[in-house]
Image (tube, helix red, strand yellow):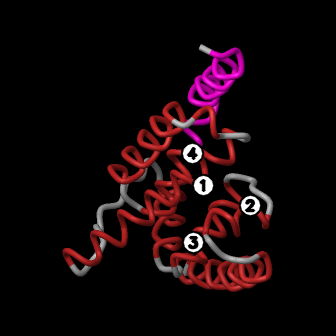
Amino acid sequence: MHPSEATNEHQIERLFVEDSARLWRAVLAYTGDPEIARDSVSEAFTLALESQDRISSAQGWLWRVAFRLATAELRRRRRTTGQVSDRVYVQDEPAAEMLSALRQLSPRQRGAIVLHYYADRPVEEVAAILGSTGPAVRVHLMRGRRRLKGLLEESDG
């Protein structure tokens, strides 16, 4: 094993320990489906280990791949069944309200909000993950925030 491969493998293992739960929660917030989140995150880490010699920034690569895998699965399910699962995985009332409100946003708005605010990713990285541009992501963030505010105010009463 080449020394840089060992370093990359160690970095991926460290990211798994330190970041996989956060990545799973972000993909869950994006998809609303714990199965898609689990499978996307697991596959992203597996692919990272297989591709470690071609990855320069493992963390950004993992987030990008996990979200792309989740998006592909959502599209596949929509094509085959005509709808996305309506299962919601939540642990407490505020989280349930937020996940419900997030599911009412467009996929681009939801992805932008989750990646930028929850995952703390810069706009340009969010654009790369979503296959978009920085200005488009800023528009999705603005519209998504406005829509979320309205949805959350409605649920408060």
Label 3: which residue? 110
Query: In the image, what residue occupies the spot 35% across and 63% down?
Result: 73
Q: Quadrant of residue 116?
A: bottom right
Query: In the image, what residue occupies the spot 72% across and 40% down?
Result: 56
Percent from the top left, x then y, of residue 53? Answer: 62, 32
Q: Nearer the viewer, residue 77 or 46?
A: 46
Q: Quadrant of the N terminus?
A: top right
Label 2: which residue? 125
**Around disc 2, counting alpha carbons within 10 Å, would you say few (fewer than 14), some (14 to 19), or many (20 or more)?**
some
Query: In the image, what residue occupies the spot 39% across and 44% down?
Result: 38
**Around disc 1, counting alpha carbons within 10 Å, would you say few (fewer than 14), some (14 to 19), or many (20 or more)?**
many
Range covered by the magenta-colored residues: 2-22
Measure the alpha-carbon separation of dots 4 and 3.
Answer: 15 Å
Query: In the image, what residue occupies the spot 62% across and 71% down?
Result: 131
Label 1: which residue? 64
Measure the alpha-carbon separation of dots 2 and 3.
Answer: 15 Å
Percent from the top left, x then y, of residue 114? Answer: 62, 62
